[in-house]
Image (cartoon, helix red, strand yellow):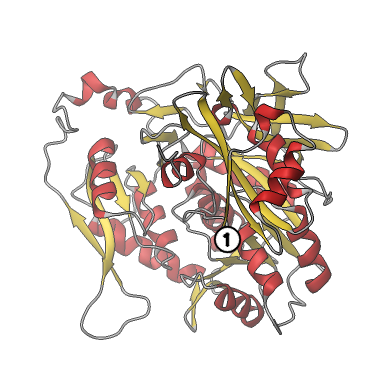
Amino acid sequence: MRTTVDDPILEAWEATRTRNRNRAAIFHAQRKISFSEIEERADHFARQLERIRAGQVFAIQIGNHPDWPSLFLACLRKQLVVLPLEETMSAEQRQSALQMCRATAFASLSFRAESRDPPDVTLKITHRDPSTCARDDRPMAATGFNDWQSHRPSLLKFTSGTTAAPRAVRFRSEQLLADCENICETMDISEHDLNFGVIPVSHSYGFSNLLTPLLVRGVSLALSNDRIPRAIIDGLAATRATVFPGMPVFYQSFCEMSEPPSLPDLRLCISAGAPLPPETARGFCGKFGREIHSFYGASECGGICYVRKAQPVPGFVGEAMSGVKIEQVDSDNPVSRIRVRSRAVADGYFPQPDEDKLGDGIFVPDDLLEKTQGGYRIVGRSSDLINVAGKKVHPAEVEAEILRCPGVRAAIVFGRESRRRNEEIAACVVAKGLSERELLAHCRARLSSWQVPRRIYFVEVIPVNERGKTSRRELARRYPVVR
C-alpha cells in the first residue's frame, strides 16, 4: 500500500494522472507509454527502494530513458534526494559527484545480450555507512548534511558553476513546481502540446522543460537520445511535436540542411544554453517560417527571462518570466549583474553554502546584463572580463565587432595568460573568404588597441559541450600563448 507523502509535485501528479489515465504520456522508439503505466512503474521502483532511508541521495544516470518520470515519482514517495547525472560524464566525474553528494544508491542502464530498446534500468544500492562519507571522512553533521532535516531537498542539481569546482544546488519540490509553472505560463505550454525531448533530462533545462511539465501539467513527451541534427528534425516531423526546447547548435544545423522536412505542427521553438546568433534566428525563420524564442535561465533558479517577440539583437533574452522579478545590482550602470527573485530560487549550494550569491529566495548570476527598452541583453559574464595590462576588456564588445566583418558567421573571444600583459585576447572565428590579416585590420580600425585580438583561430564550428555551451576557460587551455 502506497505511503501518503505531503509533496506538491506528487499532489499535482495525482491530478494529472486522474485526468489523463489512458492518454499517451511518452512516445519513445515506436512505443507509447500512458500516464497509468508511468504510475505502475513508479510503484515498481518504490518497492525496490524500500531499503533506502528518507533523506539519502539517489543518483540517476540513464540518459533520456522513458523511466525517468517513474523513478522521480518513486523517489519523491520514499522522500529520497534525487541527483541527476549526465550520461556523458566520465567514470571519474561520476565517482566524484557520487562521493561529493554522498549518494547511497544509483540507477543506471543495463545492457543485456538481447537487444532491448530502451535498455533496462538497474538500481544499484550501496551499503556505505550514511553517518560518514565524502573524501575527508568527516561526519555528515560536521559538513552540513544534517542541515536538510528541516528543509530536505527533493533534488540536487550537480553543476561546476562559474568556477571549476563542482557543487550541487538544493531544490525542494515547491521550488521545482514554481519553475514549471513559470515556464508553462510564460510560454503558454499546456497538455494540448507535445514536447520533443532531445536535450538531456538530467540537465536543468531538460528537467524543467520536459520532465516537470509532464508530471505537473500533463504535457506529453517524445523522448530521443539521438542528437544527430538530421535525426532530430526527422523526429520532430514524425512525432508531430508542437514544442521544441533546443539549443543554438541545433538550429544552426537545421539552417544548413538540404531538403529538410517541413514542420507544420511545430508552433514553439525555444533556444537556451548559449546565446542565439541573430543570423541563425533569421535563417531558421526564413527556411521554416518559425521564430525562435530565446530562453535564459540558471541551474540555481530555473527560468529568468524569455523572448516573447524575436529581436535581431545579439544576446537578447527578453523580459522577466512570469513569477520572476529582476533588479540590477548596480542601478547606476546600464550593464550590471542582476538579482533574481522567484519562488523557484533554490535553497542554496551543497556542500558549502554561498549566501551572497544564493539564498533567501534570491540568486545573483555572474552574467552581465544590459537593460534595454525591449528587455534584457546578456553582454557577458563578470568572470569573463579580460585584464589586458590593467585594462578590462569585455569579450562581448570584441565579438560584436568581429561579427560585423563581412564573411564572419560566428565568433568567441577569450583571454589567455600572458607574461607581459597579464592576459591577452584571442578569438575563434567561423568565416569564409577571410584571412586573419584582413580580420585583424577590421578590428584595428574600429577597436581600441588593447581590445584587438593578438591571434585569431579559424575553425569549422565553435566548440560546445553537451549543454550547448562554450567554455572560454577551455579555449584558453586549448590555444595557449606559445613562448
Quarter holding residue 394: top right
Q: Identify the residue at horizontal 27%, vertical 25% (top origin).
A: 146
Whether residue 104 is visible, yes or no, is yes
Q: Is residue 239 left or right of residue 444?
A: left
Q: Which residue is mark 1?
A: 461
Residue 58 is situated, as x and y percent measured from the top left of the image, at 29, 47
Whether residue 401 is visible, yes or no, is no
Residue lying furthest top in this view?
A: 332
Q: Residues within 10 Å of mark 1 (few under 14, many from 20)?
A: some
Q: Identify the residue at horizontal 63%, vertical 69% (top origin).
A: 253
Looking at the picture, does residue 429 appear above or below residue 143?
below
Q: Is residue 298 left or right of residue 183?
A: left
Quarter holding residue 448: top right
Q: How many labels were placed on the picture?
A: 1
Residue 425 is situated, as x and y percent measured from the top left of the image, at 58, 35
Looking at the picture, does residue 217 appear above or below residue 421?
below
**Observer-nearest of 7 and 159:** 159
**Observer-nearest of 286 and 179:** 286
Residue 26 is situated, as x and y percent measured from the top left of the image, at 52, 71
Q: Is residue 142 left or right of residue 328?
A: left
**Observer-nearest of 389 and 381:** 389
Q: Quadrant of the C terminus?
A: top left
Looking at the picture, does residue 276 appear above or below residue 340?
below
Question: Which SS class for mark 1?
Answer: loop
Q: Is residue 422 left or right of residue 324?
A: left
Q: Quadrant of the N terminus?
A: bottom left
Residue 70 is situated, as x and y percent measured from the top left of the image, at 40, 61
Q: Identify the residue at horizontal 70%, vertical 15% (top origin).
A: 330
Task: Please state which amino acid type lies under the numbered disc 1.
Answer: Val
